[in-house]
Amino acid sequence: MRRRCRELSLTRADTMEAVETLRVWKGEITDLPVGPAEDVYLTIPRRQYSKLSARIEKNTDISAPVARGSAVGSIIVNLDDKEVLRAPLVALQDVAEGGFWGGLVDSALLWFE
């Protein structure tokens, strides 16, 4: 019997492999690694892989403190422009609140964002 499907998988947050990094305001660090909250699997029909697209919908105003595992957006997978999967995008590490000076600078920069 021939296999007629193809699988797409994303690794979950425990593996600490970031899908992307997001800007964090008023924190000890500025770049927050993010990834899926849990294992993500998607089985698609054969020969449809080229019609598959993925994008990240992210919160643009993330301010410290941020706890590991908190939702900061979504991973959206489309097949032929139809949404077939939406998975939460979570912080892969804690971000503590930064110092007074860093918070002041970030507050000023936020006015221009």
Image: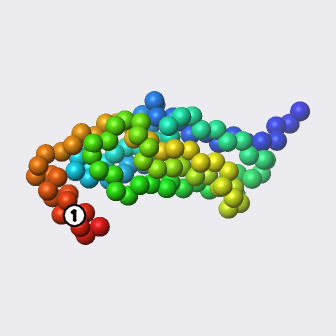
Quarter that holds the C terminus: bottom left
- In this picture, residue 47 sits left or right of residue 92: right
Q: Farthest residue toward the top?
A: 14
Instruction: Identify the image quadrant of the N terminus.
Output: top right
Nearer to me, 68 or 11 = 68
Q: Residues within 10 Å of mark 1 (few under 14, many from 20)?
A: few
Foreground pick, 41 / 51: 41
Q: Residue at x 13, y 45 (%)?
A: 99
In the image, what residue type sits under mark 1?
Leu
What residue would you read off at disc 1?
A: 109
Q: Position of residue 71 (x, y in %)?
A: 44, 43
Q: Is residue 33 above or below residue 112?
A: above
The residue most toward the right is 1
Task: Note whether residue 50 is visible.
Answer: no
Residue name at image x 36 percent, y 51 percent: 22
Q: Determine whether, in the image, residue 1 is placed left or right of residue 25.
A: right
In the rendering, at what x and y percent does residue 102 appear?
15, 52
Q: Is residue 105 left or right of residue 69?
A: left
Q: Residue at x 24, y 39 (%)?
A: 96
User: Is residue 89 something that shows in the picture?
Assistant: yes
Camera-side residue of 107 and 12? 107
Q: Position of residue 90 (x, y in %)?
A: 44, 41
- Total marks in image: 1
Secondary structure of the residue carrying tag 1 is: helix
